[in-house]
Amino acid sequence: MSTLTVPQQAPPVSEDVELLRKAFSGWGTNEGLIISILGHRNAAQRKLIRQAYAEAYGEDLIKALDKELSNDFERGVLIWTLDPAERDAALANEATKRWTSSNQVLMEIACTRSSNELLLARQAYHARFKKSLEEDVAHQTSGDFRKLLFPLVSSYRYDGDEVNMTLAKSEAKMLHEKISNKAYSDEELIRILATRSKTQINATLNQYKNEIGNDINKDLKADPKDEFLALLRATVKCLTRPEKYFEKVLRLAINNRGTDEGALTRVVTTRAEIDMKLIKDEYQRRNSIPLDRAIVKDTHGDYEKLLLELVGHEDA
């Protein structure tokens, strides 16, 4: 499901480090060399490169890249080079600082990572920002948004495949009752979405559809302009069909007037090693154009080259 291509026999880390140093030396920066190395190394390899670079030159590779690069390309390389947990912590911190009710990044991180990945992100948040993600979310959000987001970011779901069908039936009924009464922020509804395993939630929502005849997200569209309902629908999508959620984020990022480079960079850098192949397939199905071709139409220069290396561009 990953679209990252890594050499079967990766060069020694010391060689990558030396070449990266050369890319920063002399007149101008060799952006192509940076892409050819970092754009074809997995998270474990990038971590080793960063450690070896610091040992060899007494400087964090992130700081070196920050000095040499600029604009969207700089942000793409920096976010990609970070350890995944550190990256999630940085993205979550940005999201708390510029919180708006339509900002779905916190929910996205909470619902599309495994329980362990979310725990590692919370630990990285502690280490980098000297406070907890939970306290920042509680402080920066309010009302129904806080009621949903705080338990989501605090969660440690069961990651296994076991399903309790009796529970699925009773909770599907409960969800329908709450939604029928427009009790969208009811604590029981939020408890189910924030604590049940993704496998259990899928079973519950399948039961909901079988019993009620509607997909739950259709019933959560009572008011299309309600931003809390939009966040609830996105939560359901992230927990059950993340590739559909990310396809929509990319579609809006690329097809709106002007590109939303922040969203485009975030999705490509966080999903390239996870499920970008599924997202690409969903994007082509939904938009009748390959994702790489859409990126070519909407971006340019080294930023475009980096994105294409990460998503794969055999069709471009």
Image (spheres, helix red, strand yellow):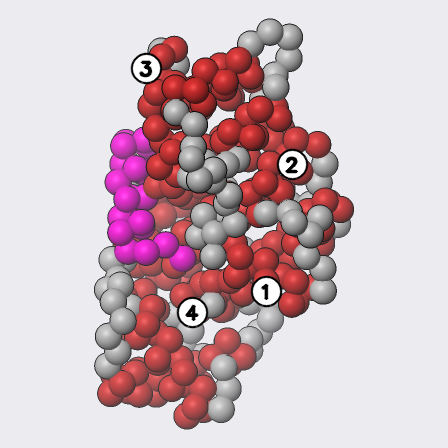
Instruction: Classify 10 Å Cα crowding around label 4: few (below 14), some (14-19), many (20 and above).
Output: some
Q: Any mark on residue 55, and which?
A: 3
Q: Does residue 207 appear in this view?
A: yes
Q: Residue furthest front?
A: 9
Element on which disc 2 rests = helix
Instruction: Answer with left or right where residue 88 lies relative to residue 167.
Output: right
- The residue labelled by disc 2 is 305
Circles 4 and 2, Cβ within 8 Å, touching? The answer is no
Numbered disc 1: secondary structure: helix
The mark nearer the N terminus, 1 or 2, is 1
Asked whether 125 or 224 is in front, the reply is 125
* Picture residue at 55% right of the left edge, 9% below the top: 25
Q: Position of residue 5 (x, y in %)?
A: 51, 43
Residue 185 screen position, x and y as percent: 39, 70
The residues tagged by marks 1 and 2 sit, at their Cα atoms, a distance apart of: 22 Å
- Which residue carries the number 4 mark? 240
Q: Quadrant of residue 149?
A: bottom left
Relative to 142, residue 56 above or below: above
Seen in the picture, residue 175 relative to 235 is either above or below; the reply is below
Q: Specify start and end residues of the magenta stretch as a single range.
A: 112-130
Q: Main secondary structure of the magenta part?
A: helix
Q: Which residue occupies 38% across, 11% down?
A: 57
- Estimate the spatial distance between the alpha carbons at disc 2 and disc 3, rounded to whole Å: 29 Å
Mark 3 lies on a secondary structure that is helix
Question: Mark 2 packing: few (<14 Cα in 10 Å), some, or many (20+)?
Answer: many
**Crowdedness near tag 1: few (<14), some (14–19) or many (≥20) residues, C-alpha within 10 Å:** many
Q: Amino acid at mark 4?
A: Thr
Residue 13 falls within the magenta-colored stretch: no
Q: Amino acid at mark 2?
A: Lys
Residue 86 shown left or right of residue 18 in the figure: left
